[in-house]
């Protein structure tokens, strides 16, 4: 793979110290090779490609750690809707990777906005929806785009499972039943895992019959993957944490519309929140506390916060705007940038590869003609794994 030099640019590393400087970045073999001050810019003859940043801003590729990209296809109805298998409320064995269409037009628009990684999740119709995958946004074959699958198991609490199954006159139609179905499956999975472990250690013990639903929950119970809980209301958030404690899960709160109302209580739980989408209307009762100040209030409480637009609720191309709106609502520009780069990378357990600019990390980067938290700034070039995926025509 060719070597690329980006010079004459403001580098926003979004590392642990939010280091920023005017200088250069060099990519080689799909990774960031070096970063440095302008006076240390290497000789251009060492590179296959040299790009003059024209005093623009180089930042890590942006990340949305909760989306349904490719599961709900652009300009299609039922034919392209593959996010919810709402014929069974418990479907942990479903894999998002089997429903994503990487040829969907929204992938191209996502890249053009500077978003280079997304977590694609089943929808929220089912109490247990399936397996989330983290993928890069460039490619034609999903297998070549996967960063980690499964990344997490998707759970859903609150209105969505209630409304879907109420219409079918099936369980669950209450919050109690939603939680009970989740617990039942986790209890079964815990016993299934215990029997598997006993059989491995004792030849006289019989292994359980293979169960694909329970097998899908084994990595979750072993702590190898996280539990992403769709929860808007404060009481649903605490139900998620209650279940997580009961089964030793690592929870992540998705949406957390009322999380800012209990931020002081959540701060002690050490649980991250994927905040948003907050640029929508209050379309159902559990969204009545919706506010674009959520990332600010969660950040002030010391809660690890990422921003989501919940594609296709809002198109992923609007992720930068969601961060900019958070700045307008009082969040610092550095914190807002972190909420769409380093924070979601850490929440996904991928902070060693993506979300920051540092030698050895994936060369996922965006060159913009102005600071990324200024509304008028435009994306000039996007790289994913060191390969140029988009360049704006001047």
Image (cartoon, helix red, strand yellow):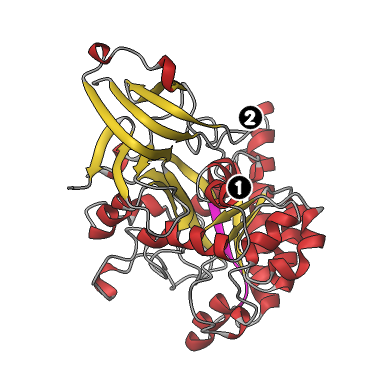
65 with respect to 303 (left or right): left
Residue 6 position by quadrant: top left
32 with respect to 392 (left or right): right
Q: Over which residues does the magenta segment extend?
A: 153-158
Residue that appears at 74% across and 71% down:
261
Looking at the image, is 29 positioned above or below residue 158? Answer: above
Q: Which residue is mark 2?
A: 200
Mark in the foreground, 2 or 1: 1
Residue 271 - label: none
Q: Which residue is mark 1?
A: 226
Q: Are circles 2 and 1 on residues that touch, CB within 8 Å?
A: no
Coordinates of residue 239 in the picture (x, y in percent): 73, 66
Secondary structure at numbered mark 2: helix
Closer to the chain start, of discs 2 and 1, is: 2
Residue that appears at 71% across and 76% down:
176
**Residue sitting farthest toward the left:** 393
Q: Nearer the viewer, residue 250 or 367?
A: 367
């Amino acid at each position: 793979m060719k070597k690329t030099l980006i010079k004459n640019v403001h580098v926003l590393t979004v590392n642990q110290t939010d280091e920023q400087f005017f200088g250069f970045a060099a990519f080689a073999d799909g990774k960031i090779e070096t970063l440095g001050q302008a006076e240390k810019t290497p000789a251009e003859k060492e590179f296959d490609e040299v790009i003059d940043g024209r005093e623009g801003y180089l930042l890590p590729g942006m990340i949305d750690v909760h989306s349904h990209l490719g599961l709900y296809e652009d300009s299609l109805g039922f034919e392209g809707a593959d996010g919810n298998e709402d014929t069974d409320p418990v479907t942990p064995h479903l894999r998002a990777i089997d429903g994503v269409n990487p040829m969907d037009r929204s992938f191209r628009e996502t890249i053009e906005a500077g978003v280079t990684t997304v977590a694609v999740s089943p929808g929220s119709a089912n109490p247990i929806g399936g397996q989330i995958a983290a993928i890069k946004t460039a490619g034609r074959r999903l297998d070549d785009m996967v960063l980690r699958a499964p990344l997490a198991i998707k759970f859903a609490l609150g209105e969505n499972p209630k409304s879907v199954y109420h219409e079918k006159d099936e369980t669950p139609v209450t919050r109690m039943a939603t939680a009970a179905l989740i617990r039942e499956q986790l209890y079964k999975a815990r016993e299934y895992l215990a029997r598997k472990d006993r059989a491995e250690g004792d030849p006289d013990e019989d292994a359980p019959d293979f169960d694909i639903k329970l097998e899908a929950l084994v990595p979750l119970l072993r702590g190898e993957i996280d539990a992403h809980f769709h929860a808007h209301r404060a009481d649903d958030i605490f139900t998620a944490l209650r279940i997580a404690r009961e089964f030793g899960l690592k929870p992540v709160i998705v949406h957390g519309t009322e999380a800012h109302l209990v931020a002081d209580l959540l701060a002690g739980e050490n649980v991250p929140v994927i905040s948003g989408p907050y640029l929508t209307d209050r379309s159902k009762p559990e969204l009545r506390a919706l506010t674009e100040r959520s990332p600010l209030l969660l950040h002030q409480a010391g809660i690890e916060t990422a921003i989501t637009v919940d594609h296709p609720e809002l198109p992923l191309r609007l992720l930068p705007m969601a961060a900019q709106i958070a700045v307008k609502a009082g969040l610092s520009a550095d914190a807002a940038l972190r909420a769409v780069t380093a924070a979601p990378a850490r929440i996904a357990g991928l902070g060693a590869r993506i979300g920051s600019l540092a030698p050895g990390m994936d060369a996922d980067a965006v060159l913009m003609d102005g600071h990324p938290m200024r509304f008028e700034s435009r994306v000039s070039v996007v790289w994913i794994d060191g390969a140029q995926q988009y360049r704006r025509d001047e």
